[in-house]
Amino acid sequence: MKHTFILLSAAVVLFFASGCEKVIKSTSDEIKGHAWSAAEGTVTSHLDFDGDTARLTVSSNDESTSIEGLCVIDDSRLMILGEHDEYIFEYKLAGKTMTLIFDGREKLFTADSARSTP
């Protein structure tokens, strides 16, 4: 009887624990698994991913500019390698927020939506 109670308790704990877990393979997967946005005054920024390609779009009033290219993420940098240019950002990830640092300036992004990543 005691063994049955222990086994049943362990099974219940494992059942609930497995349902609450989301496996993140890497920081890169966590970052690429979301669309990100930031707003400051009239300037909005959006960072989106499609596989290994990243697109960063910055808009202000009715003007907009984008950079797009292969995205490489290591433990502290997010790099967008375009056809003619490369952009290297430092990042700090904290839950559903990410600070991108470029040329000494920081911009706080928030995760907009989760994507299903393979």
Image (cartoon, rainbow, N blue to C red):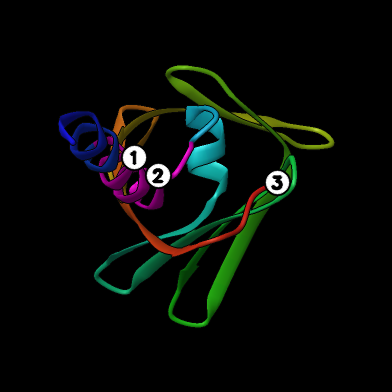
Q: Amino acid at mark 1?
A: Leu
Q: Earlier in the sequence, mark 3 or mark 2?
A: 2
Q: Which residue is mark 3?
A: 118
Q: Amino acid at mark 2?
A: Ser
Q: Would you identify the image quadrant in which residue 95 lies?
A: top left
Which residue is at the far left? Answer: 2
Residue 94 is inside the magenta segment = no
Q: Report the Cα–Cα distance between label 3 and label 2.
A: 19 Å
Q: Camera-side residue: 83 or 9? A: 9
Task: Describe residue 46's horizontal placement relative to residue 3 as left or right.
Answer: right
At 24% from the left and 70% from the top, the residue drawn is 41
Q: Camera-side residue: 105 or 16? A: 16
In this view, 52 is above or below 85: below
Residues drawn in magenta: 10-23
Q: Which residue is mark 1?
A: 14
Q: Report the Cα–Cα distance between label 1 and label 2.
A: 6 Å
In this view, 66 is above or below 26: below
Q: Nearer the viewer, mark 1 or mark 3?
A: 1
Mark on residue 18? 2
Q: Earlier in the sequence, mark 1 or mark 3?
A: 1
Q: Quadrant of the N terminus?
A: top left
